[in-house]
Image (tube, rainbow, N blue to C red):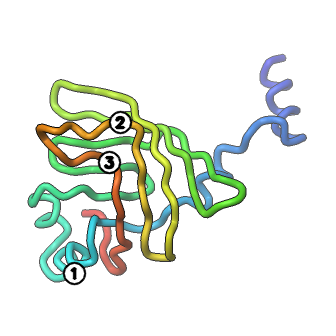
Amino acid sequence: MRILVCAAAAAVGLLPSAGSAADDFINGVYLASEELCAQAKQDSLQSVIEGGNLILTSRGIESIEYNCEFVQVTKATRAPAWLVNAVCQEPGYLFPDVLSIVQLTPTQLDLVSVTPVDPESGGGNGGSYYLCEGVSLP
């Protein structure tokens, strides 16, 4: 009975569609600068990763011994933006994060995270990311 109710609600649009938010979500590999994109193209994405840089894709944010999996993506209706719930982890530590991702240009995204930046280690999930055309995940 529960399955029939959920199916009927989805059919008339009462439940959000899981695919609708992700259909327009970011595509490709993004890095923190155009220079890093050029390095990834010339050398390899792996060399950029080994340099401790963050990689942004539709799956999440990744680096060596650090990642944030995007578990829920909600598209804004009046802006080229998304609200993302993520589960982030590093060795010995797991935490939730909420991010806003705004498309500034077809090749630049800005991320803002609610998780404060650790003053000791720096970094964080926020910042600008640039589309690396011709670069794909290993």
User: First in sequence: mark 3 or mark 1?
Assistant: 1
Packing grade of label 3 (10 A; few <14, some 14-19, many >=20) is: many
Q: Secondary structure at mark 3?
A: loop
Number of the front mark, 1 or 2: 2
Please tell me whether mark 3 or mark 1 is closer to you in this view.
Answer: 3
Could you classify mark 2 by the number of other residues whose Cα lies within 10 Å: few (under 14), some (14-19), or many (20 or more)?
some
Instruction: Please give left or right for residue 50 compared with residue 26 in the image.
Output: left
Secondary element under disc 2, as helix, strand or loop, is loop
Q: Mark 2 — residue? A: 115
Mark 3 and mark 2 residues within 8 Å of each other at the beta carbon: yes
Query: In the drawing, what numbered circle is on residue 74?
Result: none
Image coordinates of residue 27 in percent, x first then y, are 47, 66
Residue 38's mark? 1
Could you tell me which secondary element the residue under label 1 belongs to? helix
In the rendered image of this protein, does residue 89 appear above or below residue 111? above
**Which residue matches tag 3?**
125
